[in-house]
Every structure is written in structure tokens, then in C-alpha cells.
Amino acid sequence: MDEPTPSPIPEAPAPDSNARSAAEMPDPAEGAGLLEELRAAVARYVILPSSEALTAVTLWVAATHIQPALQHAPRLAVVGPAKRCGKSRLLDVITETVHEPLITVNTSPAVVFRAIGDDPPTLLVDEADTIFGSIKAAEKNEELRGLLNAGHQRNRPALRISGPEHKPQAFPTFAMAALAGIGDLPDTVMDRAVVIRMQRRKDGERVEQFRSRRDIPALHALRDRLTAWLRPLMDTAADLVPPMPVQDRAADTWEPLVIVAELAGGAWSEEARTACAAMCAAEAGKDDESNLKTRLLQDIRRAFARCGDPDIMRTRDLLDELLKDQEAPWTEYGTSGLGPRHLGILLKDFDIKAATHRFEGGRQAKGFARLRFADAWARYCPEEPTPDSGDESTTPAPGLHP
């Protein structure tokens, strides 16, 4: 009996230079563990406003290590209402864990243009309020703002005349950036950012002191392990198009963070999307709420002025003045117009509260002291200087005449 002819052995596929064996590919569990270590490292030195914010910062830092694979370079806007909210400390930790940090304080956009290449650095700007916090400063740094806006998306180069022949040259702008400062950044930057709204620590909240000589080596070791995990996954990251819980520019901004979470797997995928949905929803209503609160401050100042700028106004009288303006939003606020409770809620963030005061005739009633509004008026809706008020910088010194 003839023996059966053996089946031909299939030829092995040609080796793919970009392919890696299973033994060479990073273990997904390793990535999830690294992200947990990074999250713990951030929380060791800084108290974030929420667990979602801590997740976002962790994923943003990790995403800097795969920038060549990304279509968008999200900004990280670390903002707070006042000093000592932990903004600079968070930037310290980020600086030591991101890919190729490039501090942009006291530098020119031209230097930044030339520092960005195919594998871009991570731009870091502290005290961004000194750059964008006033109209004059913002105008002076308009080129830097343009760089930050253009660099959010790949293939948006800046054209400059360069070289002895004065020929136009395209400089790449694509690079992730973290900016920290008091108050919101320009709207165009905030719209392209994962926004972290820092708060001052309360009594009882404790963090470790950050000491460079002691802490930076450990953070660098963690950074190097992040690089070793993520760089081999660059091609995988480039091909990922994860489903997003938001749309449009918010989806573009958060996609790199969700990609990192997908690479790590486990609970990170769900946590990334939960953070994305919650933080984007909070920011979506922020502009409207902020504009409404600023409008209220302006209208209250006008109400005091119409009444002769008294030191104190009854809450009832102040509301009556506000509701007289039919073009203002107060008659339609809530279900039955602006009331004492709503007024208190809108003024809470400015630390302005109604108190019991004694009025004419010795009668006591709830009301607002005009002096309590002075700081908020100066910060959020300063009055325009009158033409004859002069300018301190141009006022002649005593005894001198122009």
C-alpha cells in the first residue's frame, strides 16, 4: 500500500522590518502599571481638583512620548484663580516626566520654531498670565499664541523669510504644550486644551515637598520606562482611531489621551473616556457661566451707581434694580427671575456674600456692602480710564513740565 503523500509545508512569510515578535512587544499589563506609577507620582506632590483631572494629566504626560504618531497635539492648560494653587509644582513634575521638555519662558517664537522637528519636544510655559494676562502683553506675544494655535494640528507650518537669499521657509509647529498661569488663557488656546483648574489646598490636605536632588532621578527613571514602553508601539498608536465620547475639536484634543489608555488596556480605557466626558462637559458651560457672572458684576456696579453709590444696599433693592433692565438676562433667570438664592450662588466664586446690616431707622435686613465688590470689579470688569485721568507712565514728575 502506497504511503500518503505528505502535505507541502507552507513557506514562512517574508520578514517585516516593522513587525516585532510577540516576545519583543511590550506587555499591556506593564503599560497599565506604569500609568499607575505615574499617577501616584503626580499625586505625591500635587493635589488635583478631581480624580478625572489626575487621570487626564497622567495620560497627557504619557502621550508626549508618542507625538510622531499623533494627528493632534493637545495643550494642557493648568490654570487657577490665584497664587499658591499648585500650578508651578504640577509643571515641575510634568517637566521631569514628559518627552524632551523645552521651557519657553523668556524665549522667542523663532527659537521655538527651530527647536521643533519630526520628533518634537514638549513645550512648557510657566506664568503664562504674564504673557497673555493683559491686552498689551497679549499683543506683544501674538506670534507665540499663533504658534500654540497652529501647533495643535499636524501640517500647519509657520512660513518665515530665512537665509541670505531671503526665501520663504516652512518651520514645523506641531508639538504638545503645557501652560500654567493665573486665570484663563486666550480662548483659542483653551479651546485646544485639556483644562486643569487648580485650587488652593485646604487645611488637612497634605503633599510631599518636591526636592530636585532627591526626586528628579526617580521621575527620570519613570520617564525612561514610559519611553521604553511606548516607543515600540508608535505604529500601533498611529493606526488607532478610538471611539470618543465627544465630538469635533474636543475629540481631536482628547484622542491622544484615549489612545494611550487603549494601549494600556484594563480600566484605563473606561477611565480615560469618563474623564474626557466629565471635563469637556464642565468646560462647555464654563464660558457661558463666566460671561454671565461678569455681566452680573457690571450690572451690580451700575445698580449701585444709579442709587448714588451707597455703602450698603438691601438685597431686595439690589434685585429690584437688576430686574428693571429688560435687556438684561435677570428677569428670565431660573424659573421666576433672579432671586436672593441665585444671586448668592452667582457671587459665591468671587467670595461676595450677603450679610445682615443695619439701615436707616435702625431696621436690620440682608444686604451687600459696596466695598465687598471692589476687588472683583477691579479684577473682572475694570472701568475704562477717563480721557482726563492721565497715565502714570506719562504723567510729568513734580516740578517738571512738558
Image: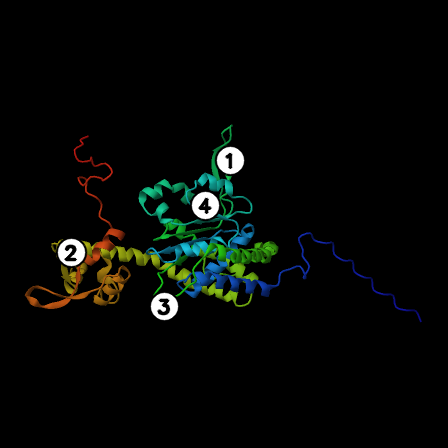
Q: Earlier in the sequence, mark 2 or mark 1?
A: 1
- Which mark, residue 150? 4
Quarter that holds the C terminus: top left
Q: Residue at x 22, y 48 (%)?
A: 383
**Kind of residue indicated by mark 2:** Phe
Q: Which residue is mark 2?
A: 304
**Kind of residue indicated by mark 1:** Gln
Q: Earlier in the sequence, mark 2 or mark 3?
A: 3
Residue 57 location in percent, x, y? 46, 59
Residue 208 location in percent, x, y? 43, 62
Q: Are the two marked residues, 4 and 1, in contact with CB atoms closer than 8 angstroms?
A: no
Q: Which residue is mark 3?
A: 204
Q: Earlier in the sequence, mark 4 or mark 1?
A: 4
For mark 4, does the 10 Å Cα neighbourhood hold few (<14), some (14 to 19), or many (20 or more) residues?
A: many
Q: Which residue is mark 1?
A: 169
Quarter that holds the N terminus: bottom right
Lateral position of residue 153 relative to residue 202, left or right: right
Q: Classify 363 as above or below 18.
A: below
Q: Are the two marked residues, 3 and 1, in contact with CB atoms closer than 8 angstroms?
A: no
Q: Are the two marked residues, 4 and 3, in contact with CB atoms closer than 8 angstroms?
A: no
Q: CA distance from mark 2 to mark 1?
A: 57 Å
